[in-house]
Amino acid sequence: MSVGRVALIVLGSIGALLGLALLVGGGFLLWADRTQREDGYLTTPTERFATSTYALTRTRLEVDADGPDWLWNDNWFGKIRVRGESAPGGKLLFIGIGPEAAVARYLGSVAHATVEDIEVDPFRVQYRPIAGGPPQGPPTAQHFWAASASGVGQQTVSWKVREGDWSVVLMNADGSRPLVADIDLGAKLSFLLWLAIGLLLGGVFVLVGSSALVVLAARRRQAPPMPPAPATASSAAGSAPASEPADRADEEPPPD
């Protein structure tokens, strides 16, 4: 087998794996879009978050919409929903989303914990504690929040994502500690269905094209038919018809 045919088989095999990966990814997104929605939001299970400090934050939420408006703009980001309730016997819960710089100024000298990592199965949260004292005022008295909610029972914050750097903050509404709350997160992504369809179509095209490469390269090239052997001089002479004997009727008879 030639080097070129081996290279085609290798490239086709890699392409087939890529096509399968696209199909799996598109299928998963389509399944999630069709089955995991609640009120239009893709929603996580409710889990408990707790800290002995005054606040719990998730920072460094960077949203960047660089690019032409027709291709990428704020409308693609959709909405997020943060829904929570204080644990039984707890205080009123405050949920807020605000600019990262403003949140950093408010909590700069406050003892709080930042969520660094979340593992889903089993659920586990890694916190980074930050030393400090109590806040200068309750979160409900601040005016920099892009969206916020507080009160009795379950609280819900729905926010249309915008470009910028943002932080999510959980606190007791009176600014006290400790904080214990049951939280779930949701996202409404308008482009998720189209992304799933695009991945599925791309996977089909890549898989079909790659399979065709493998089949084309693996086919054995049939040997061309052998041309008929040319006739040799000896065989030509041997195949010529025998000459007729000379007609002896015209010969003179021998004398008596």
Image (cartoon, rainbow, N blue to C red):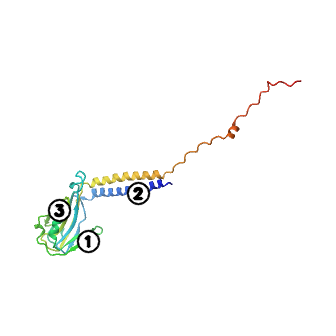
Examine the image and state in which quarter residue 8 appears. bottom left
Which disc, if any, is residue 126? 1
Q: Amino acid at mark 3?
A: Val
* Crowd class of label 2 (few under 14; some 14 to 19; many from 20; radius 10 Å): few
Q: Is residue 227 left or right of residue 43?
A: right
Q: Is residue 160 left or right of residue 221?
A: left
C-alpha span from label 1 to label 3: 23 Å
Q: Which residue is mark 3?
A: 157
C-alpha span from label 2 to label 1: 38 Å
Q: Amino acid at mark 2?
A: Ile
Examine the image and state in which quarter residue 225 appears. top right
**Compared with residue 186, is residue 210 higher up or lower down, i.e. above or below?**
above
Which disc, if any, is residue 14? 2
Q: Secondary structure at mark 1?
A: strand
C-alpha span from label 3 to label 2: 45 Å
Q: Is residue 242 left or right of residue 67?
A: right
**Compared with residue 16, is residue 225 higher up or lower down, i.e. above or below?**
above
* Crowd class of label 3 (few under 14; some 14 to 19; many from 20; radius 10 Å): some
> Which sits earlier in the primary sequence, circle 3 or circle 2?
2
Residue 33 showing in the rendered view: yes
Circles 3, 2 touching at the beta carbon (< 8 Å) = no
Residue at left offset 37%, top offset 57%: 18
Residue 95 showing in the rendered view: no
Front of the two marks 1 and 3: 1
